[in-house]
């Protein structure tokens, strides 16, 4: 198989911004009067902002009007933007820059497929915005993972077949989304929780080592 498009999730794959989502949601939960743990936060990986808020409210046993939910979602995003406004390239995860450069050197397109609506700010702040040929994020899609829309839009825009795409994800929902349309699903993180993935690596450094050998042998 000749792969043509490497699609990367953002939070938890390229940049360690997941901790800032947690801190922002934790502030909201505290203000609403209930606790929100790191374990609870795992349920929010790869999930849109409004769907994350629904999960948060279910944990707290609360029900709010649509207007109240919109206000709280905006409040959470304000906290999050304050955190990420101070991030630097030092917060790129191990191997992130190297693997983007590597795939370009092999002639693959490099795309972002993220639910984040703040992806462009994060890419600029971490100095990797120029490494992407295509950016599909929460501002471009109407359906959240495990729906594959954020990945299929990338392939469609670049006129690349789905089976020629490699997706790098740290969430179960993202792995499910990639596999549902025949893309190679590469998990970054815990092999047990990401067991549905075609391949799993602890970080992008080890993923790059694997693909360096694989692409050299097959191209």
Image (tube, rainbow, N blue to C red):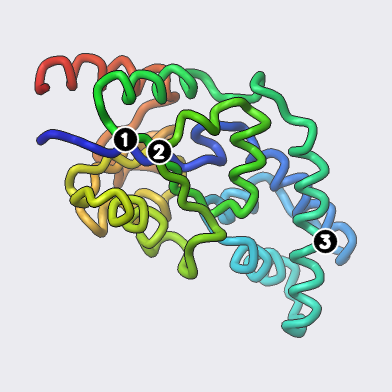
Q: Is residue 49 above or below residue 136?
A: below
Check if mark 3's residue and mark 2's residue have beta carbons within 8 Å: no
Q: Say which mark, if any, is on residue 75.
A: 3
**Quadrant of the image containing the N terminus:** top left
Check if mark 2's residue and mark 1's residue have beta carbons within 8 Å: yes
Q: Which residue is mark 2?
A: 133
**Quadrant of the image containing the C terminus:** top left
Specify whether residue 70 is in view.
Answer: yes
Distance, label 2 to label 1, CA atoms, is 6 Å
| Left or right of residue 12: residue 28 | right
**Percent coordinates x, y for residue 32 in the rendering:** 86, 66
**Percent coordinates x, y for residue 80 in the rendering:** 76, 47
Secondary structure under tag 1 reads strand
Specify whether residue 192 is in view.
Answer: no
Secondary structure under tag 2 reads loop
Residue appearing at x 63%, y 33% in the figure: 124
Q: Nearer the viewer, mark 1 or mark 3?
A: 1
First in residue order: circle 3 vs circle 2: 3
Q: Which residue is mark 1?
A: 109
Residue appearing at x 43%, y 17% in the figure: 98
């Amino acid at each position: 198989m000749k792969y043509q498009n490497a699609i990367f999730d953002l939070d938890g794959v390229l940049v360690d911004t997941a901790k800032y989502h947690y801190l922002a949601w934790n502030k909201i939960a505290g203000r609403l009067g209930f606790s929100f743990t790191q374990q609870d936060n795992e349920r929010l990986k790869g999930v849109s902002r409004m769907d994350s808020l629904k999960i948060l409210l279910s944990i707290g046993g609360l029900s709010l009007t649509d207007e109240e939910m919109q206000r709280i979602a905006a409040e959470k995003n304000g906290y999050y933007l304050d955190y990420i406004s101070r991030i630097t390239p030092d917060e790129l995860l191990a191997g992130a820059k190297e693997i983007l450069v590597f795939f370009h050197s092999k002639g693959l397109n490099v795309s972002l497929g993220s639910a984040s609506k703040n992806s462009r700010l994060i890419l600029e702040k971490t100095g990797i915005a120029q490494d992407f040929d295509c950016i599909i994020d929460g501002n471009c899609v109407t359906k959240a993972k495990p729906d594959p829309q954020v990945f299929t839009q990338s392939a469609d825009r670049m006129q690349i077949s789905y089976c020629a795409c490699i997706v790098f994800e740290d969430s179960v929902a993202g792995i499910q989304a990639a596999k549902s349309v025949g893309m190679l699903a590469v998990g970054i993180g815990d092999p047990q929780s990401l067991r549905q993935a075609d391949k799993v690596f602890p970080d992008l450094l080890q993923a790059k080592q694997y693909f360096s050998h694989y692409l050299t042998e097959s191209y």
